[in-house]
Image (cartoon, coloured by chain):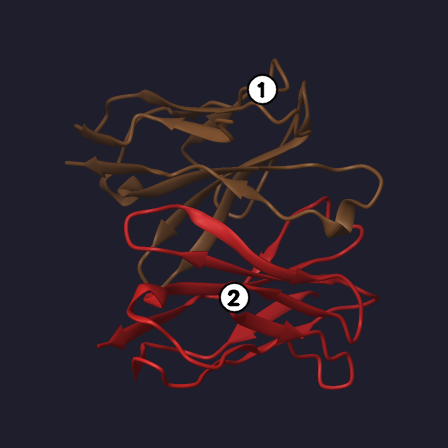
Chain colours: A brown, B red
């Protein structure tokens, strides 16, 4: 009963490096999303997906790419890391379909990223 | 558009005190409302939800009632414990929003023994 699994838990990058944050869920959820959480800013949506092969931008997509080739996986790519991307990143998933408004999100435990 | 406003923290209480965290919303139609909790160093967990007016969500001693007349979903607990220290987020989900939750900024709660 893994739920939403994020890796790595911690990462330090140098400015300009690229990396991929991994997110996988085993609940057959159609909807997946990436958030960043910064002090005083709450949760801000980066990208989301309503199903395999479908992605869209959230509030703060610049500097990030996503793809959704399978239902289970939704990786987040940082193309060229900047200090402004220092944050805690959360992946979340949800059922959709019949009764869609009744379903909450299931969150991963987060990735704490520091860009120096 | 849709929005959620929740009271600013931090809120500091003594153990066994009564807790209220206010949450009001703006939305068209009939959204679903949620409270999430984030314990230190962890991800967010769904605490409770209500999907229609006058519904009461409850879990772990916490309650919130969906009040359409006042557009509110205040979180309450009769007797808080040290283990309730966390950040609490109010959120709204509306039809036509492509399943994007609308979040409040979170309220930090610290409970002292």
The correct choice, above or below, for B11 with respect to B93 in the image is below
Quarter placement of the C terminus of chain A: top left
Q: Quadrant of residue A58?
A: top right
Residue found at x 69% / y 29% = A30
Q: Position of residue B113 (x, y in %)?
A: 21, 77
Q: Are marks 2 and 1 on the same chain?
A: no
**Marker disc for residue B106:** none
Position of residue A17 in the picture relative to residue B20 (left or right): left
Q: Quadrant of residue A63?
A: top left
The correct choice, above or below, for B41 with respect to B80 in the image is above
Q: Position of residue A49 (x, y in %)?
A: 63, 31
Residue found at x 74% / y 69% = B27
Residue found at x 32% / y 76% = B10
Q: Residues within 10 Å of mark 2 (few under 14, many from 20)?
A: many
The correct choice, above or below, for B14 with respect to B32 in the image is below
Report in which chain the residue with disc 2 lies.
Answer: B
Q: Position of residue B109 (x, y in %)?
A: 34, 72
Label 2, on which residue?
B104
Residue furthest top in the image: A69
Residue found at x 69% / y 47% = A103
User: Secondary structure under badge 1?
Assistant: loop
């Amino acid at each position: 009963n893994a739920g939403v699994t994020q890796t790595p838990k911690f990462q330090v990058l140098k400015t300009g490096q690229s990396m991929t944050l991994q997110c996988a869920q085993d609940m057959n959820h159609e909807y997946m999303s990436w958030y960043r959480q910064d002090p005083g800013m709450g949760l801000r949506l980066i990208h989301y997906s309503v199903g395999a092969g479908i992605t869209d931008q959230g509030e703060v997509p610049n500097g990030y790419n996503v793809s959704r080739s399978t239902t289970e996986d939704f990786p987040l790519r940082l193309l060229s890391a900047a200090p402004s991307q220092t944050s805690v990143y959360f992946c979340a998933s949800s059922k959709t379909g019949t009764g869609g408004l009744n379903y909450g999100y299931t969150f991963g435990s987060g990735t704490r990223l520091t860009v120096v | 558009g849709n929005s959620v406003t929740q009271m600013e923290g931090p809120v500091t209480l003594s153990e066994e005190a009564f807790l209220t965290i206010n949450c009001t919303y703006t939305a068209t139609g009939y959204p679903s409302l949620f409270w999430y909790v984030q314990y230190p160093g962890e991800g967010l967990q769904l605490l409770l939800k209500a999907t229609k007016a006058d519904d009461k969500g409850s879990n772990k001693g916490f309650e919130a009632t969906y009040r359409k007349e006042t557009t509110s979903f205040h979180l309450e607990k009769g007797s808080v414990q040290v283990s309730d220290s966390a950040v609490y987020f109010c959120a709204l989900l509306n039809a036509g929003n492509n399943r994007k939750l609308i979040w409040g900024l979170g309220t930090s709660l610290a409970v002292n023994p």
